[in-house]
Amino acid sequence: MNLLENTYQLFTDEQAQFWTLVWEHVNMSLISLLCASFIAVPVGVLLTRRQSIAEPIIGIAAVLQTIPSLALLGFMILILNQIGTVPAVVALTAYALLPILRNTYTGIAGVDPALVEAATGMGMNSFRRLRKIELPMAMPVIMAGIRTSMVLIVGTATLAALISAGGLGDFIMTGIDRADNAYILLGAIPAALLALFFDLVLRITERTSQGKALAPVAIVLGVALLVVITPALASNQQEELVIGGKEGAEPEILANMYSLLIEENTDLETSVDAGLGSTSIAFNALESDDIDIYPEFTGTVTANLYDQGVPAGSTREEVYEEARSLLADDGLAYLDPMEFNNTYALALREEEADNLGIETISDLEPHTDELVPGFTFEFADRQTDGYPAIVDTYGFEFDEVETLDAGLRSNALQEGQIDLIDAYSTDAYIIEYGLTVLEDDENVFPPYQGAPLLKQETLDDNPGLEEALNRLGGQITDEEMQEMNYEVDYEGADHREVARDYLEENNLLGSN
């Protein structure tokens, strides 16, 4: 009961965001259903006239549905070269084709041949026979396919939050990231209720439209178009800079700092689109103009974006200059870095570190057969500054390695499912869970100072932007960043308010 009370309290506190995410989820779901219906129903009808190709076409739709939904979203990002609603809708549409296509074909093909023959004998051509006989008779089966696709879309749409498409998945991803079940329920329960609601609406539409073949389709079309058109009519047409950020509290806090500084010191309008997931998604979003600016780390630029190792002992200034030079060659501007160094680190429970006498990464070598690391997918794959680099530099590897989402690591660590995690030096849960950060005695991890990354043309087109963003240069210590992350992750503070408080306390706002 305590969890339900926490969820209700969270709903009360986050009502404005809740209804925004519900609207985004409904909008995305209905657009996807509309697109799937527009494609699958005509194709299904066509296949009843060309039955020799029916099974191969339906087989293609079946193959699309066998692709894991997360992988399909990833494919759409690569194919369309953008993030957000468009690739999400395309992926959801592809995922929803099979039930509608198969049911349309089966429903029309299953109409009593005697009725079809009688209609032909009365002089009806193929189109009239379809409209007067076949569609009305097949409509219950077609609607069953549409209802199945609608439920499938609403559930799968929660994953669209991973590519910054919004929706109730935002709450679920936040809950996973913060290990907060209340957030997960606040996203999951409404998503399930939406699926049941749409199924009920389509069921009622089907029952009240018997004998009116086009009525159910017309109703679904009308509602979907209304949902699509309303946000477009109400949207603000004023051009604005979009500030992006990866998944987690820290990138969103920094994105809001950029937003506040830009609006304070220039005439530009901004919006924040954080929660973009991995480095590759955020960088691709910048390159494809889905976002204009986002905070990136010096070590990530050299090691991850350009796959270049950093010589051991490199200073912060050397790593930053190397990153800035690499980016400049690609027409990207990298402004002044902040003070804090959010470097990678390996951490384990304090009591276990004390019991085993582990203080450095080298100290792990005698325990590779008994300790089970739980690494994020990105860290496990990063060649120059991730687990492969640990193996190459330190000369040992663990017998068993688990890979899991960043938000699940701390809970898994506390429950004893894993023993060691990759962390960032400013992560709030280092304090919350009493973790010991191991010394990187071979200097595998380069410096990671955050700095604004944007296209040079964006900088050139917006006078005053560079000066506004560089106000954060040299600001924010490790301790200050960790405290801000803690306020958001464990005290429930709003990202923008935390950002504003820091800027005001350090005289970075209101002091041109």
Image (spheres, helix red, strand yellow):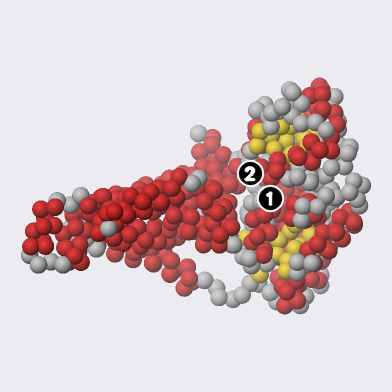
State whether residue 443 is above or below residue 290: above
Q: Residue at x 87, y 42 (%)?
A: 443
Q: Secondary structure at mark 2?
A: helix
Q: Is residue 475 visible?
A: no
Which quadrant of the figure contains the C terminus? Answer: bottom right
Q: Residue at x 27, y 58 (%)?
A: 50
Q: Which mark is residue 249?
A: 1
How many residues crowd mark 2 within 10 Å: few (<14), some (14–19), many (20+)?
A: many
State whether residue 231 is above or below residue 431: below
Residue 314's spot in the image, x, y percent? Answer: 91, 50
Q: Secondary structure at mark 1?
A: helix
Q: Earlier in the sequence, mark 1 or mark 2?
A: 2
Residue 259's spot in the image, x, y percent? Answer: 70, 65
Q: Residue at x 88, y 39 (%)?
A: 442
Q: Is residue 50 visible?
A: yes
The three-letter code of the residue at mark 1 reads Ala
Write down the residue under mark 2: 177
Residue 138's spot in the image, x, y percent? Answer: 22, 53
Q: Nearer the viewer, residue 281 or 186?
A: 281
How many residues crowd mark 1 within 10 Å: few (<14), some (14–19), many (20+)?
A: many
| Callout 1–callout 2 Cβ contact below 8 Å | yes
